[in-house]
Image: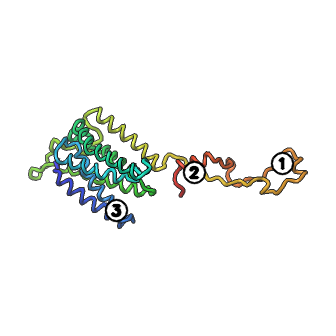
Amino acid sequence: MAGYREHITVSGLCGVGYGTATTLLLGFDPVQGAIAGCLTWIGGMLPDLDARGGRPVREITALLAAVGPMIAIRRLVDVTGGIDATILTGILLYAAIRYGGTWLLDKFTVHRGMFHSLPAMLIAAQIVFLAYKSPELSVRLLMAAGVGVGFFSHLLLDEFYSVQWNGIRPRLAKSAGTAIKFFGPGFGPNAITYGLLMFLSYAVVMKSDRLLPPRMIVEQVEPLEQQTGPATPDQKATPNPKRPAISGPANQRPRDETLDRFAAEFGPAPL
């Protein structure tokens, strides 16, 4: 099994490569690439949160407690509505993650449990996607994918170290297959993991505007008198005057201000 230092080194190298590649090849801002690289490095430590005490858990929880509120700072400002309230919320989140998170992990996790799994990798990436606020979907995907890359590097390194060589003959250790997996041995952890995964997946889809209908753009219809001029006495006497044709689809309706406000609030951003 790979040690803590090996995981830090490998995930750090992955972070440098990921941040550099996304900046040079995909055209992201260098600062955004640097943040994504740091998240890749942090993601490579996350599976060891189930180490049940010791130096790795203390360092990782302290790092998450400090970095987590910073990643979600824009989201916290929107929720709290002010800088002072955001500062207070950040302090409370730090204390909750640093101390409450450590207690929960020590109480309910087992080493090489569902923290070492592909669903846990997706959950970590989705949490970052939801916490990091940006008007550009690609930037949120960049940050989420960075955590996923780092997380997967940890799982892959654990599986690599589970293969032991005796000359030219490989031998699998007992830990083989316990890192890159979809299910653990217990029903309860599996149910909680996949329940959380489905909930976060739905939230991600909603935040990326994939389930919302496209915003309807309805042409404003000018009043009848502005289109045809004032009505004459003969036209007023006509029981059913012929209305001018309205351009657009046959089922197009006049603008509804309530629908417009709803679309502006919950609809996807205009292209």
Instruction: State the residue at coordinates (33%, 64%).
Output: 21
Quarter of the view holding residue 120: top left
Closer-to-camera residue (245/129):
129
Task: Give the mark nearer the N terminus: 2 vs 1.
Answer: 2
Q: Which residue is mark 2?
A: 215
Mark 2 near mark 1, Cβ–Cβ under 8 Å?
no
Q: Amino acid at mark 1?
A: Pro
Which element is circle 2 on? loop
Image side of residue 59 versus residue 137, left or right: left
In the picture as drawn, the residue positioned furthest to the bottom comes out as 24
Q: Is residue 243 above or below residue 188?
A: below
Task: Give the mark nearer the N terminus: 3 vs 2.
Answer: 3
Coordinates of residue 63 in the picture (x, y in percent):
25, 51
Mark 3 near mark 2, Cβ–Cβ under 8 Å?
no
Instruction: State the residue at coordinates (45%, 48%).
Output: 207
Coordinates of residue 3 in the picture (x, y in percent):
16, 50
Residue 33 - label? 3
Q: Which residue is mark 1?
A: 241
In the picture as drawn, the residue positioned furthest to the top comes out as 187
In the picture as drawn, the residue positioned furthest to the front comes out as 84
Mark pair 1, 3: CA separation: 64 Å
Instruction: State the residue at coordinates (43%, 43%).
Output: 202
Q: Amino acid at mark 2?
A: Arg
Could one spot residue 152 in this view of the protein? no
Which element is circle 1 on? loop
Could one spot residue 256 in this view of the protein? yes
Quarter of the view holding residue 117: top left
Which element is circle 3 on? helix
Task: Give the mark nearer the N terminus: 1 vs 3.
Answer: 3
Coordinates of residue 145 in the picture (x, y in percent):
35, 54
Q: Amino acid at mark 3?
A: Gly
Q: Residues within 10 Å of mark 2 (few under 14, many from 20)?
A: some
